Amino acid sequence: MTTVVSWALFDFANTFFAVAMLTFHFPLWVVEDRGGSELIFSLALGVSMACVGLLMPFCGAISDASGQRMRYLRWTTYGCVVATFLMGFLQPLWLALVLFGIANICYQLGTVFYDALLWRVAPAGRVGVVSGFGAAFGYLGSMAGLLFLWPFARMGGHQATFAPSAIFFLIFALPSFLTIKDDGQERRPVQWAAVVRAAALRLAMTVRHASNVSGLWRYLWASFFSANAINTILIFMAIYTKKVMGFNELQIIQFFVVSQACSIAGAVFLTRLIPRWGSQRTLLAIWSGWILALGAVTASPSLQWLWVIGPTIGVCLGATWATARVLLIELSPKEQIAEMVGLAGLVSRFSSILGPIAWGVLVSDPRHYRHATGLMMMLLAIGVWLLWKVPNPDFQARRQA
């Protein structure tokens, strides 16, 4: 149990980086404090996520070939912590964006090694439970990050949160570093050329296998479009609530904390619909909820209305990832689940490029925020349309039974 808690604490820890650098303080620092545009931030994020997408398959191969997952998890964590810490003392915007890109690459690649540890730390037959346990710690980390970093922001501005977020990340990651050890018998020297060739070949084979599985490839495309919208909303929600809705800093903190609490509720309660509706129909309902919430914001961007829409988005957010994971597993051949989960993770990283850049281009003119939210609705609608054509695995299984 100690190992499981230590593993979950890393999910709690790395959320400090996500809160400070991806969704809240760093975007606001770029736009509000340094006079940069949302497009500049989107480009820095997009370039770093493209690098992550290219490197992920090779990191997975290195993890499997060496058996030294904790070693590489520590390295990526230290890289993220150091780059983030240095950003707290820099003024040139371009240099901060470069360090942000490095930190984000380390953060994203670290999740590859972290996820690979799940199969080792979870007791037999409890992988799903332990995975949900880690996700819950992640949402708690989001709330803690907002609350722990707020005093630093109030006293010194957004940049004052960068170094503390790095320190909190490292502190809460230490239990996993000290408790979870690589198995000495698994350690093997890495033949780098062979690993690169094997990773490229495995990726090509995984894509080919996915294209031959009924409904899976269409589901991955549906996830790509929907995740572009969802990731964009999460990245720019803080800026939107401040620039468009007129929230002050404290109101934004309260808004995010309430939304995160609703995410936990969504993950717990909406996923209970899966046994009754099936994962495909449940995910259709959740993504449709996203569209309705964004439609309400676009039609009536009032302060009071947003306090209804924010928790609604939170509920949909929490249920989205939990339900999508179930559908992916149900669609995947049982002997290829790990491959398909890795491919879905790759699609998820590339889904943080198109949406944010399109948003940044549109809102370069502040009059076009409504058009930007409309574009997110369109991306979600494409995802819903593609998902509608995906077979409902649970329904099919019951009909065949």
Image (cartoon, grey):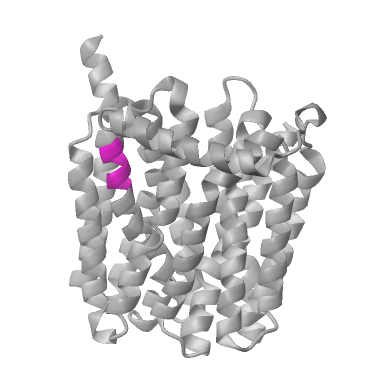
Quadrant where the C terminus sits is top left
Q: Left of 366 or right of it: where is 2?
A: right
Quarter occupied by residue 296: bottom left
Number of disc labels: 0
Place of residue 397 in the rendered image (x, y in percent of width and height, measured from the top left)? 27, 17
Residue shown at the point (29%, 46%) measured from the top left: 221
In this picture, is 167 found above or below 281? below
Place of residue 324 in the rendered image (x, y in percent of width and height, measured from the top left)? 37, 39
Residue shown at the point (78%, 51%) measured from the top left: 174
Q: Left of 223 or right of it: where is 52?
A: right
Quarter occupied by residue 326: top left
Q: Is residue 117 visible?
A: no
Q: Left of 264 or right of it: where is 216?
A: left
Principal SS element in the magenta part? helix
Quadrant where the N terminus sits is top right
Residue shown at the point (30%, 70%) measured from the top left: 358
In this rendered view, identify the residue nearer to me: 121 or 77: 77
In this picture, is 175 found above or below 365? above
Place of residue 349 in the rendered image (x, y in percent of width and height, measured from the top left)? 45, 54
Place of residue 12 in the rendered image (x, y in percent of width and height, measured from the top left)? 63, 52
Residue shown at the point (33%, 25%) measured from the top left: 275
Q: Is residue 29 visible?
A: yes
Magenta region: which residues?
217-223
In this rendered view, identify the residue nearer to me: 337 or 265: 337
